[in-house]
Image: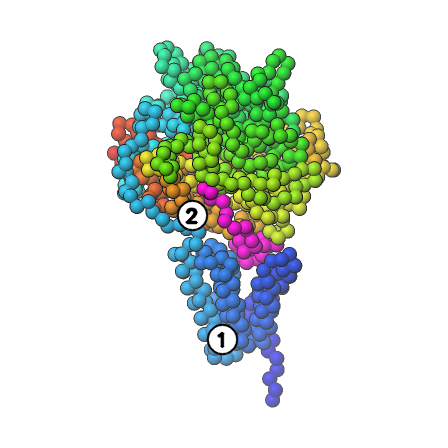
Amino acid sequence: MSRQPTSSTSLGFIGGITLVFTALTALYLLIGGAWLLSLGGSAYYVVTGVVLLGVTWLLYRRRPAALVLYALVLVGTALWSLWESGPDFWALAPRSGVLVVFGVWLLLLVSWRLEGAKKGGVSALVAALVIWAGVLVYACFNDPQTINGSFGASAGTTPAANPDGIDPADWPAYGRTQEGTRYSPLQQITPENVKNLQVAWTFRTGDTKGPNDPVEITNEVTPLKIGNLLYLCSPHQKIFALDAQSGELKWTFDPKLQADPSFQHVTCRGVSYIDLATNGACARRVLLPVNDGHLYALDAITGERCAGFGNNGDLDLQHAMPVKTPGMYEPTSPPVVTNKVIVVAGAVEDNFSNREPSGVIRGFDVRTGELLWVFDTGAEDPNKIPGPGEHYTWNSPNSWAPAAYDAKLDIVYLPMGVRTPDIWGGDRTPLMERYASGILALHVATGKLAWFYQTAHHDLWDMDMPSQPTLDDITDKDGKTVPVVYGPAKTGNLFVLDRRTGEPVVPAPEMPVPQGAAPGDHVAPTQPFSELTFRPKNLLTDADMWGATMYDQLVCRVMFHKLRYEGTFTPPSLQGTLVFPGNLGMFEWGGIAVDTDRQIAIANPIALPFVSRLIPRGPGNPQEPEPGAKGSGTESGIQPQYGVPYGVTLNPFLSPFGLPCKQPAWGYMAAIDLKTNEIVWKKRIGTVRDSSPIPLPFKMGMPMLGGPIVTAGGVAFIGATADNYIRAFDVNTGKEIWRARLPAGGQATPMSYSVNGRQYVVIAAGGHGSFGTKLGDYVIAYALPQ
């Protein structure tokens, strides 16, 4: 009597679900894989789809060979995955997750329903699952992205630095010194005792997001500490003076910023301080930049306006601007201040139009606010002060991040941005780009040019210099001391220049870059690439694409191949261009921290691709703005770029689930030996606890906004990550040795000081609107128990 074909219903309800799942997965992989293969991608998905159809048929027939065939899928996937990504757990997870879970399902719920399964099918499946378990366990402890070097010498044994006679207990400038080192000579907190840190005090500013604020509202402040007082500002540029020991409020000042949803930023990175060494009111001053284009000078002791400065303590920075719309010109970073001059620069709204405020840099008298000099970066004579009825140059390149200052040379070093609109430059002349995207060195006394070094030619990617340069003295190969400036660039390059001349100390050869700009534009044939760099060594491929599962990873691979991408500096396009390093850059406004005693730099590079897509003018995309048109209130999404042939969309490269399409890590902590210019250690930083629907503490390496500090005690501190933590790292090894949960996002750079011999570490936890972290109004100080 012949056997009748077995129907799917004989597998029961569980078997039916299994058949549906395998059939749908097979069809998805076949169709999507065929699309990917037609674009030049991996054949794996088509092959796996075909094999899964075979598994489906064998399951339908209740054949144990289904288990053997599925075991081959698992083993083949393991080999393919290791070939593509190596033993990287978070790269292997989406390739294996669905298949391994389904393999366990087959083993536990389905295998016993198959005829003769115990004759070999179960054993094959168990062996394949064991292989995957071994691969994943090995990958957990052998991260190919990690560098596990060590500096060897014990931290804290070197003399504490005391540059320029600054009290080691203080933090009197944004980067502690105006050299931008972010290095505290305090040694009380060490790798051994940092685990004992506890909250010493918490202050709440009461300054939170209002109904008229834009998306881009942030609290990026690094407080200052001088004597017994702490000075800090909040997103709406309210300033607070606190008792440094207790966090008690001493005085406050509110400039009454009238924010608007069109503002591209509502933020304050910090204030500046100057002691004029005189007697009377305002002998010690705090300078507060405000996003509506004003600068206030306040008495550091009382908070009262300095009457002899500007208009009763208020300096109007909108004077002689070609456009005075509030929010178009925003000083978001603290100015450089000497005993004679305040050097003021500011942000100009990105990508709104070609008729925007000037990026002019100005020097004002520190006592009176009188204009002493200008450097208009887009003018033929950059030092020409506009006369009556004249104005500064439209859209000249601006400097939005903090500058650094060398008191001995009396030179200020400004990180320069690009002439906006950023993503199309067909109308730019050489004069307009003469001082764009590089490091500009000016003589502070006169505003005259010392030198300029361009780090991105004809910048079409917003690859500006995004952070405060850092000054240090290093010993060259001939044993000579060379004063250098370190310039972290969005490209991941760390440019090292002689700060007297602007000549590279670490070679940065010009190298060919992809060509083929959008119609009407051009691309520079070469770009400088520093030999000290965190930029990717290899081009991204579809093997670098990622997702929570194999399904969205396949979509990301298809999306990747549909974009234009030929490496760093691939030109913007109508097709859509993958920008990597992305518009956030590998370095952002947090900069680097340098232990000047041990010649160690601490950095936190990020790796998150963006997509830019040019939008030709046409219906819904007019060439000129309507009367009264305002900005978008954000730096991402649709950007109009009025006055040029294209608008643009700028967005992170994300999967349909909203996850980055590039595999992790997206953020690292790293240390560089500045004597050899080698990266000694590099570790992933940050978890998905505050980014995923389920608060899982998976350490994947998260994007960051904010920077590190380093102490002579051998500890580096950082907030910045997309999860709400402040962390401490051992400078010698890169080991994470402490972390504390923050009540909101810590997108700010911390600082450290001491009072009565007790060392404190302070960070603002206010979150970041467009970065998506929790908003708040906290300033938190940590210290060892008394």
Q: Secondary structure at mark 1?
A: helix
Residue 625 in view of the camera: yes
Amino acid type of the residue that numbered disc 1 sits on in the rendered structure: Gly
Residue 180 appears at what percent x and percent y? 41, 30
Name the disc covering residue 684, or none.
2
The C terminus: image quadrant: top left
* Residue 532 forms part of the magenta stretch: yes
Asked if the magenta segment contains residue 356, the reply would be no
Mark 2 residue crowding within 10 angstroms, few (<14) / some (14–19) / many (20+): many
Residue that numbered label 1 is attached to = 121
Q: What kind of element bears circle 2?
A: strand
User: x%, y% of residue 170?
Assistant: 33, 27
- Mark 2 touches mark 1? (CB < 8 Å): no
> Which image quarter holds the N terminus?
bottom right
Q: Is residue 595 visible?
A: no
Look at the picture and state if 114 lies above or below 535.
Answer: below
Judge whether 388 appears above or below 267 on screen: above
**Highlighted magenta segment, given as a residue range:** 531-558
In percent of width and height, residue 122 lies at 47, 74
Residue 579 location, quadrant: top right
